[in-house]
């Protein structure tokens, strides 16, 4: 049967990203790169279809070098520049069973953190890394069918693929996919690095001029397929409100743009087994959950009264996330009964605003200005409501972790939040609360609604059960990515522009 030989086809995918959990994580991109390759490898082949062999590449940051992971040195190689070559090193390790390459070199090791304070500081590191990634298939003798890049950090690899193909037989038939996790972060300020590494600007006339020398637009113009991390975000970026001045360009590419919702790693994020929790729980022993709330209240020096609703924020502190909306909203709601834990780091003024709120309302507010994954897990397991008034949210993973741990999101209806949270006003199986506008009054209206429903204990618990029972696993999304890879590798005619 023809189907039999096709079912044996293995699509080789080089998945390149700036972070991958648990090795290195600053936000949701790290979670995705840490979980999606493994989910794709686990899928196996469907009848008559292909399977994927995904290998991951991330920079060999100093923080990984000083952790106790074991990495095998493979070989040295060079990335050329206008003024001589920069030496690179290729190492191999394994991440959740995925063959993972780590790329070292001065531009990576000279950088103090994963992301610096601006794109310029990160420019050379990620241009160097992107070009190094393109060399890996021939260095290891591995034909790459799909180059899958993520966000601006690795988009230059897609832009440069056409040029690299000319010198590199392992890339000759390689197709490319670029996933947009966060459109506004385009990598402006890399001009010097592009010149140094001999990267010519994009010549796509559909791009605005400013975009021809910024990594994300350059990659978007060259990619065979573009993925946004939720169906709603894929539509939103075609509008002036969310398109960051690329909406006209993206509309022209919309035949090659699709939305695939992120999943979460349901094994690592399982309240029944999570070692970060003192009291593991599931729907079947749900009463145990309240012990996590009591432990969390005690940890933050609150009175251990579990009937006062405990709100939480777990977030990067960035304009995107609407932290200012939370602060204004909570200030206006100070006479209501609630307590809040604000966990996050980022923009200094937002960190300070959270500390100020704690000083103002010491009986109600705790500001935990740190990045602490174990604490985030205890918060999802113990808090009642997660606050996510995002101005835009390409997908959002925090709300999915929260729901899986029985903590109901109050979220702005945008991007992946609209795609994953079901509100009692519009759903018979609600899992959280949605509000329409990114402003304090819209947030307050939803918070009041949630606080009223919190008193209806049976209804609330039914919502928690709905939330915990929703399937947020990668299985469906990984299948969608595999379908995309399959289309690309089987049908080159769909690659041509309309
Ligand atoms: P984004 O990628 O835009 O930051 P996501 O919701 O997709 O948003 O992913 C955020 C991830 O980072 C989640 O895993 C969340 O739990 C985690 N996170 C955010 N802030 C912190 C923090 N201060 N400490 C620990 N984890 C955090
Ligand atoms: C970005 C987005 C977030 C998304 C994450 C992973 O950082 O802000 O919404 O969940 O990437 O795709």
Image: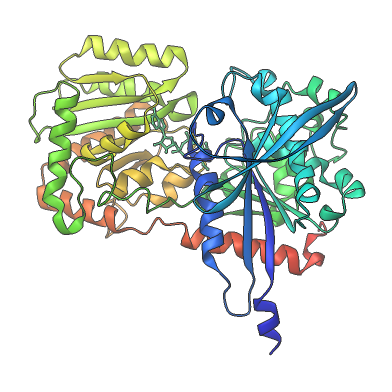
Whether residue 285 is visible: yes
| Relative to 124, 275 lies left or right | left
| Relative to 390, 385 lies left or right | left
Q: Nearer the viewer, residue 485 or 318?
A: 485
Percent x, y of residue 226:
67, 50
Q: Nearer the viewer, residue 70 or 379?
A: 70
| Relative to 481, 489 lies left or right | right
User: Which picture quadrant has residue 409?
Assistant: top left
Percent x, y of residue 449:
22, 39
The quadrant of the rendering that contains the C terminus is bottom right
Q: Nearer the viewer, residue 107 or 364?
A: 107
Percent x, y of residue 329:
30, 24
Does 120 sit above or below residue 442? above
User: Which picture quadrant has residue 245?
Assistant: top right
Q: Nearer the viewer, residue 188 or 372?
A: 372
Q: Name the residue located 71 percent from the left edge and 23 percent from the top edge.
A: 107
Does 497 sit above or below residue 76? below
The quadrant of the rendering that contains the N terminus is bottom right
Colouring used for the render: rainbow
Q: Name the residue located 26 percent from the left edge and 26 percent from the top edge.
A: 341
Percent x, y of residue 297:
16, 28
Whether residue 430 is visible: no
- Report the label total: 0
């Amino acid at each position: 049967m023809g189907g039999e030989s096709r079912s044996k086809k293995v699509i080789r995918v080089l998945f390149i990203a700036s972070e991958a959990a648990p090795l290195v994580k600053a936000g949701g991109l790290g979670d995705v790169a840490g979980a999606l390759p493994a989910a794709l490898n686990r899928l196996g082949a469907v009848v008559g279809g292909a399977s994927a062999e995904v290998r991951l590449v991330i920079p060999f940051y100093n923080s990984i070098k000083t952790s106790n992971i074991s990495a095998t040195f493979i070989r040295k190689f060079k990335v050329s520049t206008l003024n001589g070559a920069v030496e690179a090193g290729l190492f191999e390790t394994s991440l959740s069973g995925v063959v993972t390459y780590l790329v070292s070199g001065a531009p990576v090791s000279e950088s103090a953190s994963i992301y610096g304070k601006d794109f310029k500081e990160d420019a050379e590191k990620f241009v160097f890394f992107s070009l190094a990634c393109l060399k890996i298939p021939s260095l290891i003798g591995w034909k790459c069918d799909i180059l899958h890049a993520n966000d601006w950090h690795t988009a230059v690899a897609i832009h440069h693929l056409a040029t690299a193909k000319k010198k590199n037989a392992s890339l000759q038939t390689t197709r490319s996919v670029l996933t947009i996790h966060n459109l506004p972060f385009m990598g402006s300020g890399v001009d010097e690095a592009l010149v140094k590494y001999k990267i010519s600007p994009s010549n796509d006339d559909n791009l605005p001029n400013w975009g021809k020398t910024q990594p994300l637009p350059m990659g978007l113009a060259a990619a065979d397929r573009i993925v946004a991390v939720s169906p709603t975000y894929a539509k939103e970026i075609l509008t002036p409100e969310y398109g960051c001045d690329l909406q006209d360009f993206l509309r022209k590419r919309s035949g090659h743009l699709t939305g695939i919702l992120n999943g979460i790693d349901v094994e690592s994020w399982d309240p029944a087994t999570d070692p970060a929790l003192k009291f593991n729980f599931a729907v079947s022993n749900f009463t145990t959950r309240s012990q996590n709330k009591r432990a969390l209240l005690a940890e933050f020096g609150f009175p251990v009264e579990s009937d006062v609703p405990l709100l939480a924020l777990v977030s990067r502190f960035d304009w995107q996330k609407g932290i200012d909306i939370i602060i204004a909203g909570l200030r206006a709601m100070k006479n209501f009964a609630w307590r809040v834990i604000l966990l996050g780091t980022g923009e200094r003024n937002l960190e300070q605003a959270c500390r100020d709120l704690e000083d103002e309302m010491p009986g109600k507010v705790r500001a935990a200005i740190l990045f602490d994954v174990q604490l985030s897990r205890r918060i999802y397991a113990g808090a009642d409501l997660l606050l996510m008034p995002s101005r835009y949210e390409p997908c959002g993973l925090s709300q999915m972790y929260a729901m899986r741990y029985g903590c109901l999101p109050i979220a702005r209806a945008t991007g992946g939040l609209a795609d994953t949270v079901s509100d009692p006003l519009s759903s018979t199986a609600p899992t959280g609360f949605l509000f329409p506008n990114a402003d304090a009054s819209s947030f307050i209206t939803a918070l009041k609604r949630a606080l009223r429903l919190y008193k209806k204990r049976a209804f609330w618990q039914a919502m928690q059960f709905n939330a915990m029972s929703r399937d947020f696993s990668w299985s469906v999304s990984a299948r969608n990515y595999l379908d995309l890879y399959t289309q690309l590798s089987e049908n080159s005619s769909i690659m041509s522009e309309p």
